Image (cartoon, rainbow, N blue to C red):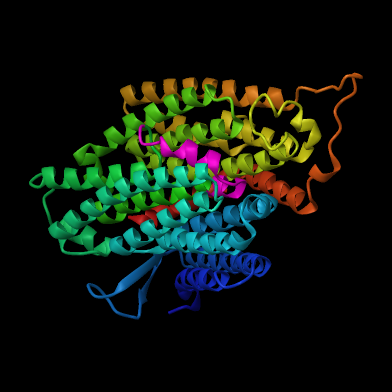
Amino acid sequence: MAFPTNFPMISIISCLMCGVVCSILKKDKARYVTYGLMILLLILSGGVLSYTISVDSEFIYQMGHFGAPFGNELRAGVLEGVLAIFFTVIMFLSIIAGEKHIYEDVEENKINLYYTLICLMMSSLLALTYTNDIFTAYVFVEINTITAAGLVAVMGSGRAYFSSAKYMIMSLLGSGLLLIGITLLYDVTGHLLLSNIKEAVDTIAIKDYSEPFTIIIALITIGLSIKSALFPFHSWLPDAHTASTISSSAILSSLVLKAYIVLLIKIYYRAIGWENILETGVNDIVFVFGIMAMIFGSIFAIAQKDVKRMTAYSSVAQIGYIFMGIGIGNTAGIVAAVFHIFAHGATKSMIFTSLGGIKAVSGHSTKLADITGAGFRNKVAGVSFAVGAFSMVGIPFFPGFVSKLNFASAACEAGSVKMIVILVALAISTILNCLYFFRALIALYTPVRDMAGELREEVDNTRPTVKYIATMACFIAVNLFAGTFSDLIIKLITQGLKMFS
């Protein structure tokens, strides 16, 4: 077996080990260990992607070299390699861009704990990407949940504790439904490995067991939808974002929510079978809730007077896009949904981290009334927010535009009713996106003058650091790459989905 096939296992174990190490280190040393881990993960993830592209095939790594039904497996193809790189890059940029706020918002004796949670979060993201065992996936879903709640609570304020508890309660409800679905699936098939479940499902006539399978698929879908903050299960998300430090908000929106959707797609394809999903009609229900999220998430965003909370509600709408793509029911819709995972992740993490710079020059506030003129006081943050807003609205050359184009193209391949609904929903959602993002941009670039009529100058201690400037430049570069070289990303997604089946 080629050496790169060990990389997924090394990646997950490295994250867990670094989490343990960071818990006993001082804050700066824990930060250096975490940064070193991210560089290692980039190398390993790049190796997985390069190897799977070269052999044009996926590979299976048996933990301890024990096969089914006793062993545990990791399974990696092109899509897993791309996802691993994406998760690592966005995590790395998010914690670097928010480093100053981590040190300001988190108590000094808890900063190493913050980086411990980051390492454990990365282990769960990579495990959910690579695992071929549905119960192992559940275990790391819980690790993801606990670390995400910890990233909110680590702020130490009463508001943070309340938001973390609210998130935990909602997330545990989703976890419970997911576990019931997994238990029933195991009861019917007798397997936990996704590929073995699929083989067992193929031997069963779904028409004869339509009710049990519909219940199983519904439980798993609802459970992961709650954890992904799909409307109307989104109520915990705005509070969690508002109470979190900047890096935590970027990670929650861009990575945590996406990991659950990735797992859902894996279960649909590798455990149940996409044809069986379509036969039960669960995708049509997912489609309806996705459309509702697109519209209502944007309406709620318009009503907000705090830009950070507005951006959180925007994430609810963007999650709706992804579920709508899944619900379309064709391959083009799935490809569009997966691409939007990348597009939204790259864009929304940049928007949240740009709010860190805007907040620093606006009296530590992100309210619309307080950020007036902040685009002049912190030009880097202002430009980064503008680029993110242009992407979310759907301006050409940015990934958000490509996503909407892909969804429209997938709609044309669907039935006439779905096509009309999707195109109308895309139009309405785009108009609503313009309303709240451009309102924020207008506030950012409305000059504020003092009593003498001079523009208010930037305070020296709020000037962006070189590290922040470089990180935001990388964020912008990632977004421009995803928008201008989208064909390459879509090609890799398509190739990876073929290996997914």
Of residues 142 and 108, the one nearer the viewer is 108
State the residue at coordinates (78%, 46%).
464
Tell me, yes or no, whether the highlighted magenta stretch contains residue 185: no
Quadrant of the rendered structure where residue 109 is?
Answer: bottom right
Left or right: 169 as drawn, with respect to 109: left
Q: Is residue 431 above or below residue 349?
A: above
Question: Which quadrant holds residue 476?
Answer: top right
Residue 407 in view here:
yes
Q: Is residue 318 left or right of residue 89?
A: left
Which percent across, then down, holds residue 342? 52, 46
Q: Quadrant of the C terminus?
A: bottom left
Magenta part of the protein: which range? Answer: 232-251
Q: Residue at x 63, y 49 (%)?
A: 105
Where in the figure is residue 126, as x and y percent of width and height?
Answer: 46, 61
Q: Residue at x 62, y 39 (%)?
A: 351
Is 358 or 130 nearer to us in this picture?
358
The image shows residue 68 at horizontal and vertical percentages of: 24, 73
